[in-house]
Image (cartoon, grey):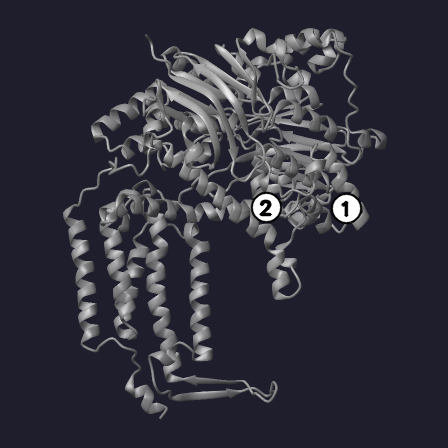
Amino acid sequence: MMEIPLVVENLSFRYRDRQGAAIHNISFEAKAGEVLLIAGASGCGKTTLIRAINGLIPRSYKGEMSGKILVFNEEVKDWKLSQISQKIGTVLQDPERQILGTKVVNEVAFGLENLGMPREEIYKRVDEALEFLKISHLRQRETFNLSGGEKQKVALAGILALRPSIVLLDEPLASLDPASAQDTLDAVRTLADQGLSVFIVEHRVEDVLRIHPERVMFMSEGEIRYLGNIAGLSKVVNYREVKISAEEIEERAKQDPAPAEIHVLPGAASKGPEAEALVKFEDVAFGYDLEHEVLHGINLEINRGDVIAVLGPNGAGKTTFVKHAIGLLKPKSGRVLVDGHDTREASVAQIAQMLGYVFQSPSHMLFAPTVREELAFGPTNLKHSKEQIEQEVKEALRIVNLSEKENDPPLALSFGQQKRVSIAAILAMRSRILVMDEPTAGQDYQNYMNFMDSILQMPAFEAILFITHDVDLAVIYANRVLMVNDGKLVADGKPQDVLRDFDRLKANRLIPTSLLALNLKRFSATGRFMRAEALAHV
Amino acid sequence: MLVAWRYRKRENSFIQSFDPRAWVIFYACFLFSTLTFWDVRFLIPFFIIATYVLLTSGVKWHEIRRAFLFIVGFVFFFAILTFLTGRGGTEVYKEEHLIREFRASFSILGWTPVLKVTVERAFFAVSQLARISSIAIMTILIPYSLNPALYGITFKGVGLPDKFAYAMDLTMRFIPTFGRDFQLTMDAQRARGYELDKISGGIIEQVRKLGPIFVPVTIHAIISSEDIIDAMDLRAFGVGPRTWLDVLTYQFRDRVLIGFGVFILAVSIFVGVMGYGAFWVPDALIQLFP
C-alpha cells in the first residue's frame, strides 16, 4: 500500500501570548502529486497551519498544541527540525526573508552544507535544482541583485535541493509581477506532476487556479470551511471574499442586487480641473550611483482627478519613480514640481502636506504604543488641530476597517492589519494627493477591495497614484495607467487603451486577466471598464 | 534580506591578491602591533603600510568618500578633544612642558577656562592620529575588498567553529542591512512630516522623540533576526559539522603575508617588553620649553 505523505488529525494550536485558538480541529490528508491550494482571509490560520506542518510550531513558536501530524505514517512530534526539513520544504512568505547566501550557488547549497554532504553531491544537487527551475544562468549571481521572481525561484531551488517529498509555499506570489508569478506557478505544477505534494497558501486564488490545483482548502476563523475540488469552491465561498474568475463572479452576481456606484474622487470632481499640474516630472533622470542610471527621461503630469495605476515588472524603477514625487529622491537631471514647487527646494515634510506616501513595508514605520497614536503622528507633525486630528484618525480607522483596534499596539497586529494601519496613517494626514506602493500586497481580497472603495471615495484627495502588480486593480479603479519598464515610461493612457494591447502587456511582464478580457469583450456596450459584479447588471 | 557591502572584484588590487584568511590574520597582527605603541616614530611605519594598502587597493575615492570622511572627521575630533582637555594622554605621560597658555577673559561660577598647550599634549595628539588613522584605513578597506560570499569560510579557516563562523558572516552583513533599514525608516517617517533636525526639548524629551526612528528599526531588526533563524532552522542549520562549499587554498604569497604579519607582531611585542615604543617626545623640544 502506498504511504500517504502527510496526515493531519484534529490539529489545534493556540499561540502562547494570544487568546483563542489560531487553528481548531484541522484534519486532512495530502496526496502525492497534488497541488493543494489553501485560501482564506488574513488571520484565518493559514500560516499557522503551515508552521505546524513544517515544525516551526511548536519548536520556534510556543503555545498549546493538540492533535497529530504524520509524515509517511510517522508522527513528527519528536522529530528534530533538521529531520522534518529533509521531508518537508518551506518557502516563506517573502523570499527576501529566506535567502541567506550572498550568491545563488551558496544559497541553494545552504541546506546541503548543513547536512554535511560531500561537496560533489552538493554541486550535483544544486545544479539539478537550478536546471529544474530553468535558472542555471543565475548560478553565480549575487542574490541581492536578483529580481523578485528570480529570488522566489532561488528560494524554491534551495528547498528542492534537499529533495523533500512535501513542499509548502506561503504566499509565494505576494510580491511578484504577473509573469514571474506565472513562472513560479508553472514550476509548482511541474513539481506536483513529478510526485511531490505541494501546498500553496495564496490570496491570489485566480492566479493559482490557472495551474489547476487538484484540491482547494478554504479556511475561516481557524477552521476548514471547504476542502474539495476547484469546481466546488465557487459554490461555497462568497465571491466577495475570494477572488474567483470574472465570468463566475458575473454569473453569480446576477442574482444579487447591483453594487453601489463608486464616486471616484468626489473632492476633485467638485473642484473641476486645475490649470497647473499637481505634480510634474520634467525630463527626470536618476541613478543610485554614478555608473548606473535607473530612471531615464521621465516626463509626466499628474492632474486633478487622476487615479493612476503604475504597472511594470519587478525592478523596473516604479518605486524609485514615485519616491521622486515626495522628494525622498532628487533627480540627477531634470526636475520634479509638486504644486509648482521644485522638490529640490522643499523638505519632505513640506511636500508631505500636499502628497501622502504609503510605503510598501509597514514594519519600517510603525512605532507607537497604540493604533490611535500611530495615526495621530502624521497629522501632529503637520500641525493639525487636536479636534481635527481626532476626526481624521476616526475616519481613517473606519476606512481600513480597524476601528475596534484603536487601542491595540500596531506591532502586535497581523501583517495584513499592519499594512492597513500604515495606509490609515497616511489617510489621516489628509494630503491632497495619495501615493501608495503596492497597497494590496499580502492583503486578502475582501479587505483590500473594501478599503480601495473607501479611499477612492474620500473627498480630501484630488489625485491618487498606486503601484501594483494586480492588473485587475488597474481595471477596476484607475482612469489612467502608467507602464514603467527599465526606468522608462513606456505607456501612459486610459486603461482601455493601454491594457488592450496584449503584446505590450507581455513585453512588460503582465498577463491579461479574466476581468480584463471580459471588460474588453463588453466594452462596446459599457464604454468603460467595470468590476465583474457591475458587469452582471449591464 | 541581508545585503552585502559594496564589494567587487578589482583588477591589480594588492589586498585582493591574497587569500582572505591570510589578509584577516595579517590585519589582526597589524591591529595588535599598532596598539602596542604610542611612540610616533614606531607608528609611522604602520601608517605607511596602511597608506600603501589603501593606494594599491583599487578602491575608487567616490566609493569610500563618505565613510572615509566620516572616519577622518571622527579621528580628528577625538584627537583635538584630547589635545584641548589633556585627558587620555595623562595615562602615558607624567609631566607636561608648557608651550603657551590661553586664559579666557570670562569666568563661569568662579571658574576661568584655561587652555594649556604643552609639548606632551601636542605629541600625544599626533601619536593618536597616526595610531587610529592606520587602524581606520586598514579597517575601512575590509568591506570593499573581502568577498562577502567568503566571509563564513574565511572565519572558519582562521579556526572558528561552524556556528561562530556563520554567525560572524551574518554579523558582517547585518551592518549594511541595518544601515539600509535605518534609511528606509527615516524616509517613511519623513514622509509623515517628521523632521529629525527640528527635534527640540530637554535630553529626555529629545530621546523620546527619536522613538519613531529607533522603535521601527529595532523591531525590524528583531523580526528579521527571527526570520533568519527560521530560515536557518528550516534548512537544518547547526545539526552537525557542515560542509563549506567554497574551498580556499593558500598560495606562497599568502604564507609570506602571514609570516610578515606574525613577524611584525612578534617584533612589536618584543620591542614593547624591552621597554621601547612608549610615548615619546623629542628631548630638544622639551629643552626649548623647560
How far across and down, in percent of the image, does residue A214 sit?
Answer: 48, 10
Determine the CA span between mark 2 and mark 1. Answer: 22 Å
Q: Are marks 2 and 1 in one subunit?
A: no
Which of these two is toward me, A30 or A302? A30
The chain letter for the residue carrying disc 1 is A
User: Tag 2: Cα neighbours inside 10 Å, few (<14), some, or many (≥20)?
Assistant: many
In this rendering, the answer to whether B122 lies above or below A267 is below
Q: Which residue is mark 1?
A: A389
Query: Of discs 2 and 1, which sits in the foreground?
Result: 1
Mark 1 residue element: helix
Q: Is residue A268 left or right of residue A251?
A: right
Which image quarter is the N terminus of chain A in?
A: top left
User: In the rendering, which numbered label is found on residue A338?
Assistant: none
Q: Amino acid at mark 2?
A: Asp
Please give the name of the residue rendered at 42% of the width and 66% of the height, measured from the top-left corner.
Answer: B75
The chain letter for the residue carrying disc 2 is B
User: In the rendering, which numbered label is found on residue B187?
Assistant: 2
Please give the name of the residue rendered at 63% of the width and 48% of the height, measured from the top-left corner.
Answer: A369
Which image quarter is the C terminus of chain A in?
A: top right
How far across and down, in percent of the image, does residue A141 sit?
Answer: 36, 32
Q: Amino acid at mark 1?
A: Ile
Q: Is residue A142 visible?
A: no
Please give the name of the residue rendered at 62% of the width and 17% of the height, measured from the top-left corner.
Answer: A243
Task: Specify the quadrant of the image occupied by residue A45.
Answer: top right
